[in-house]
Amino acid sequence: MNHYTAKQLADILQHDDSKINLRTIRYYTQIGMLPPLALSGNKRVYTAQHLHYLRAILTLSRTGETLASIQERLQALSMEEIVKIGDQLHLYRPGRVLENEILRISEDVLLTISPKISAETRQKVIESVSRVLQEDGQ
């Protein structure tokens, strides 16, 4: 099992988000957004589990969720689900979002579509999402 210091985690996560730093990681630890630290000998250390949590927090914060709602949401998820959320972090790179077309489907739903997708597939996606929203009464 890999063990990390808060500084090492900050350095790793700098590649994903330049705004994350040592202070942010310590703050998330202090307010209980991360699981309790592991013990290695007589030291408290971060593990890969903490790295997954931090990536999930970064991903969710980029979607506009508040820290309180993120904390509540993560507590209800399995580790597998947290990993899946964290794996989506690259989709929310600021430059990447600007490369894509953003369509407002409804007041509450925005759809981001890559310009690489064919016009036919694009239309099918829009129609499918619209149909689901209509069936749901939105």
Image (cartoon, helix red, strand yellow):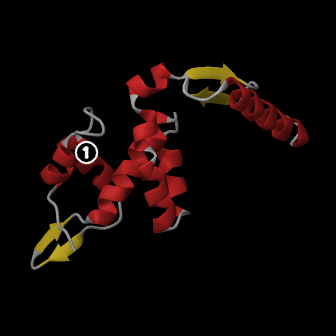
Which residue is found at the position 79% from the left and 37% from the top?
Answer: 128
Residue 58 lies in what quarter of the image? top left
Which residue is found at the position 70% from the left and 32% from the top?
Answer: 121
Is residue 132 placed above or below 98 in the rendered structure?
Answer: below
- On the image, numbered disc 1 is attached to which residue? 13
Q: Position of residue 67 (x, y in %)?
A: 45, 43
Horizontal side of 82 relative to 119 (left or right) equals left
Does any portion of residue 32 appear in the rendered image?
A: no
Horizontal side of 28 relative to 83 (left or right) equals left
Q: Quadrant of the C terminus?
A: top right
Is residue 21 placed above or below 35 in the rendered structure?
Answer: above
Q: Quadrant of the N terminus?
A: bottom left
Is residue 95 placed above or below 69 in the rendered structure?
Answer: above
Which residue is found at the position 19% from the left and 75% from the top?
Answer: 39
Horizontal side of 8 relative to 77 (left or right) equals left
Number of marks: 1
